[in-house]
Amino acid sequence: MMTAEVFKQQIRQQAQGATRLHVAYIGITAGLFETLRRLQQATSQALAEASHQDPGYLRVWCDAAYAFEYLEVDAETFRLSELGQLMCPSAPDTLMPMVIQAMLSAHMAERAAALLPSGERPGEAVLGERATLLPWFGPMLEQSFGALFEHTICPAVPVFSTVDTQGGLALDLGCGNGWYLRALARRCPHLRAIGVDGFDENIQQARARSHEAGLSDRLQFLQGDLHDFHLPEAVDLIAMNRALHHVWERDQRGIFQWLYDHLKPGGYAVIWEPAWPSERETLRLPTHRGLAFQNLSEYIQGNHLLQPREILEAFHAQGMHTELHEFMEGSEVLVVAQRPHEHTT
């Protein structure tokens, strides 16, 4: 059994780790790591000029970044350390998602503490309360889940290639910065798709990145809310990428009816969700522990994480055929539901 002193030492180390992430967050969101990577080396004054930031803030940030080993220094000239290189969002193995998630968690923890007495659940607007956070939400998800989807999930789920072979039309509800559809388009060269999201910041990023990837002719992105959005035609596939729980409490029956009505006969709904476990003990597994705090964050937004059986039962109630795919030791699931074909007599 660990003593109180051992616990204190652990907490001190964790607190210092949190401070280290705070310093990295400033460097990521202000573009300081990327700018210094491009310059290779610079004084704090030169870094301030190149990144269009205040020289006073840059001087003290460079000292903090040096203290936490993101920067090395020769006299007054700074360069990125190996750890600093990993904080560049463009680095293939970037640590950016961990830093953004840590700051998002800190924001949500503060909001939860303030809301506990009243029980207020202000909704998804809390994601936009920090101006420096919202632009990084999509890139965080892309770096965290993009490779998993493109190289593991997509090849393992046959409906994607089926719709691609048909030259079908897909719809991504809650598309974020469009990373899911870009990955899908890379693997499915005949597929066309529409992405819809409620945040203009996300739509602007999605359009820009689609253009950069040369996919604008196949991918279209629109700002809108599911409950006010009307498709001009039924589609072959509707994806909800970690988004179903965002509308579940508001209109569970309505969303499943909407999915059914906007699919062609034989079309597919593909739902990717973090899987809330049926047994509380599962939350202590390292692969599932983060779900507990995520569920607290979702509660603030008026949501809760879903058990896979809840999703399956809702599709069955619509008369749709389902299959379940599990990933990441069961912490991530994909539910595929097919609208029945129409039978003629």
Image: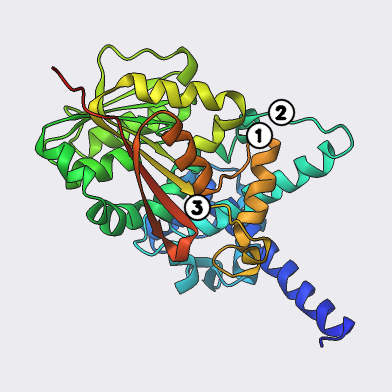
Q: Residues within 10 Å of mark 3 (few under 14, many from 20)?
A: many
Residue 139 x, y percent position in the rendering? 43, 46
Is the Cβ of the residue at disc 1 closer than 8 Å to that at disc 2?
Answer: yes
Q: Which amino acid, by three-letter code, is at mark 3?
A: Leu
**Res. 242 in view:** no
Q: Residues within 10 Å of mark 1 (few under 14, many from 20)?
A: some
- Which structural element holds mark 3? helix
Q: Residue at x 53, y 42 (%)?
A: 310
* Distance between mark 1 and mark 3 Cα atoms: 32 Å
Residue position for label 1: 301
Instruction: Report which quarter residue 147 is drawn in.
Output: bottom left
Q: Quadrant of the C terminus?
A: top left
283 over 119 or under it: above or below: below
Residue position for label 2: 122
Instruction: Report which quarter residue 209 is drawn in.
Output: top left
Residue position for label 3: 32
Instruction: Report which quarter residue 222 is drawn in.
Output: top left
* Distance between mark 3 and mark 2 Cα atoms: 33 Å
Q: Which amino acid, by three-letter code, is at mark 1?
A: Gln
- Which structural element holds mark 2? loop
**In the rendered view, does 242 fall on the left or right side of 11?**
left
Q: Which amino acid, by three-letter code, is at mark 2?
A: Pro
